[in-house]
Amino acid sequence: MKTYSSIGPTWEEVRGQIFTREEIEESDLRVALIGELIQARQERGISQRKLEEMSGVKQPVIARMENGTTTPNLSTVLKVLAPLGKTLRIVDLDTNG
């Protein structure tokens, strides 16, 4: 492990020691998904409260999804994405498509 005398190891180094590769990949995917959801909502100028009206998902649930304090089930994610004009796609891991 590489350390820096004044600040210690980097987060990437610590993360690699604490979590498995699979856990890191899952976390990164969750962060990317929620980031896309937040970006789509903000680009459309939609508040969490308005998204609640559009999706049927309660605003506190949307807030917890966006701040990462909960892992929503798939149906909740799909309900929130649809009014934003988004959906999920299954793609090969070795492509960007």
Image (cartoon, rainbow, N blue to C red):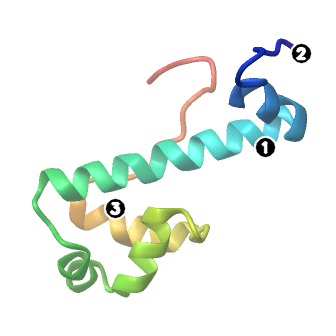
Query: Marks 3 and 2, Cα distance to the nearest angstrom?
Result: 41 Å
Toward the viewer: 94 or 25?
25
Residue 95 image position (x, y, % from top left) = 54, 18
Residue at image x 32%, y 55%?
38
Task: Identify the disc placed on residue 1.
Answer: 2
Q: Are marks 3 and 2 in contact (CB under 8 Å)?
A: no
Residue at image x 54%, y 40%?
90
Residue at image x 56%, y 70%?
72
Which residue is labeled 3 in the image?
A: 81
Query: Marks 1 and 3, Cα distance to the nearest angstrom?
Result: 24 Å
> Residue 12 vs residue 86: left or right?
right
Amino acid at dot 1: Glu
> Residue 40 vs residue 97: left or right?
left
Residue 9 image position (x, y, % from top left) = 78, 24
Residue at image x 47%, y 64%?
67
Q: Tag 3: Cα neighbours inside 10 Å, few (<14), some, or many (≥20)? A: many
Q: In this view, does 52 lie above or below 84?
A: below
Q: What element carries label 2?
A: loop
Which residue is labeled 1 in the image?
A: 23
In front of the other: label 3 or label 2? 2
Q: Is mark 3 on a helix, strand or loop?
A: helix
Q: Do we see residue 32 in this rendering?
A: yes
Q: Do the residues labelled 1 and 2 touch (CB within 8 Å)?
A: no
Q: What element carries label 1?
A: helix
| Quadrant in the picture for the N terminus | top right
Mark earlier in primary sequence (1, 3): 1
Amino acid at dot 2: Met
In front of the other: label 1 or label 3? 1
